[in-house]
């Protein structure tokens, strides 16, 4: 059984989508980011960086994994799915996964902050991150002009990238002029497992969450 510590963010959705696609049994442990639960000592034992997502594999000696890309690789290897066995094709999938981890996620995340949340609108910062996110989207569009998915076959690279591109409008970045990227977004969105994963963590049961947190802390005491 996988325990998934997550919240409603693109990085969180990556992992819940993967778990659904791989048909791995899992339980959701919603983390209330607004209450800084991810910074509490018990969570820092699972993820020293104090961010979501994180997982604990109860079937593997309670092994904890953090960083969404590392989690996707771990789950793909555990399930034997969505990461090619051929060394070259595996490398292609990992290259596009790293493209998301090092490029799309950080740049779009900054675009979100300066466009949507910053108390002071700094036009230079808005333009800088908006333009870089659009450039990265253009790279994806060019790749998808000749490939149905990022690594030919649907893989963890697509699962990592789709949740970010799916909310492009939140960062003020449009994709109307990127037809291949639009096609890819729409294709993945039709997958039932993606829809289920995108709905996680769902509505938080406050009483159940409180009882579970109390039991977790008691076990650690």
Image (cartoon, rainbow, N blue to C red):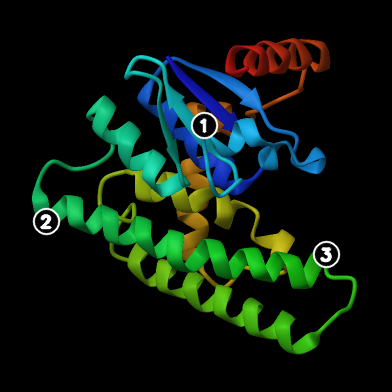
Q: Position of residue 79 (x, y in %)?
A: 27, 25
Quarter of the picture holding the C terminus: top right
* Quarter of the view holding residue 117: bottom right
Q: Nearer the viewer, residue 146 or 16?
A: 16
Q: Position of residue 190 (x, y in %)?
A: 51, 36
Judge the density around disc 2: few (<14), some (14-19), many (≥20) Cα neighbours within 10 Å.
few
Whole-angstrom CA distance, mark 2 to mark 1, is 27 Å
Q: Which residue is mark 2?
A: 88
The residue shown at (75%, 34%) is 32
Is 158 drawn above or below residue 174 in the view shown? above
Are dots 3 and 1 in contact, CB under 8 Å? no
SS state under label 2:
helix
Are dots 3 and 2 in contact, CB under 8 Å? no
Q: Is residue 70 left or right of residue 210?
A: left
Judge the density around disc 1: few (<14), some (14-19), many (≥20) Cα neighbours within 10 Å.
many
Quarter of the picture holding the N terminus: top left
Q: Nearer the viewer, residue 102 or 156?
A: 102
Q: Nearer the viewer, residue 52 or 193?
A: 52
The residue shown at (59%, 42%) is 52
Whole-angstrom CA distance, mark 3 to mark 2, is 41 Å
Mark closer to the chain start, 3 or 2: 2
* Quarter of the view holding residue 61: top left
Q: Which residue is mark 1?
A: 16
Is 166 drawn above or below residue 174 in the view shown? above
SS state under label 3:
helix
Is 11 drawn above or below residue 176 in the view shown? above
Q: Position of residue 116 (x, y in %)?
A: 81, 65
SS state under label 1:
helix
Q: Which residue is mark 3?
A: 117
Judge the density around disc 3: few (<14), some (14-19), many (≥20) Cα neighbours within 10 Å.
few
- For this orientation, the residue located farthest to the bottom is 124
Q: Is residue 6 visible?
A: no
């Amino acid at each position: 059984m996988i325990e998934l510590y997550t919240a409603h963010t693109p990085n969180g959705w990556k992992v819940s989508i993967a778990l659904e696609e791989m048909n791995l049994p899992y339980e959701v442990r919603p983390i209330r980011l607004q209450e800084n639960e991810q910074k509490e000592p018990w969570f820092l034992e699972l993820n020293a960086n104090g961010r979501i997502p994180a997982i604990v594999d109860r079937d593997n000696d309670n092994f904890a994994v953090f960083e969404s890309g590392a989690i996707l690789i771990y789950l793909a290897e555990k399930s034997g799915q969505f990461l090619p066995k051929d060394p070259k094709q595996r490398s292609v999938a990992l290259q596009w996964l790293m493209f998301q981890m090092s490029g799309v996620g950080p740049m779009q995340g900054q675009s979100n902050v300066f466009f949507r949340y910053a108390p002071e609108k700094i036009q230079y910062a808005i333009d800088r991150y908006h333009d870089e996110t659009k450039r990265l989207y253009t790279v994806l569009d060019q790749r998808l002009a000749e490939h149905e998915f990022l690594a030919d076959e649907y893989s963890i690279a697509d699962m990592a990238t789709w949740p970010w591109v799916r909310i492009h409008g939140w960062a003020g970045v449009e994709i109307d002029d990127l037809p291949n990227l639009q096609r890819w977004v729409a294709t993945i969105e039709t997958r039932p497992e993606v829809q289920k994963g995108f709905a996680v963590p769902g509505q938080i049961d406050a009483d159940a969450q409180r009882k579970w947190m109390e039991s977790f802390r008691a076990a650690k005491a």
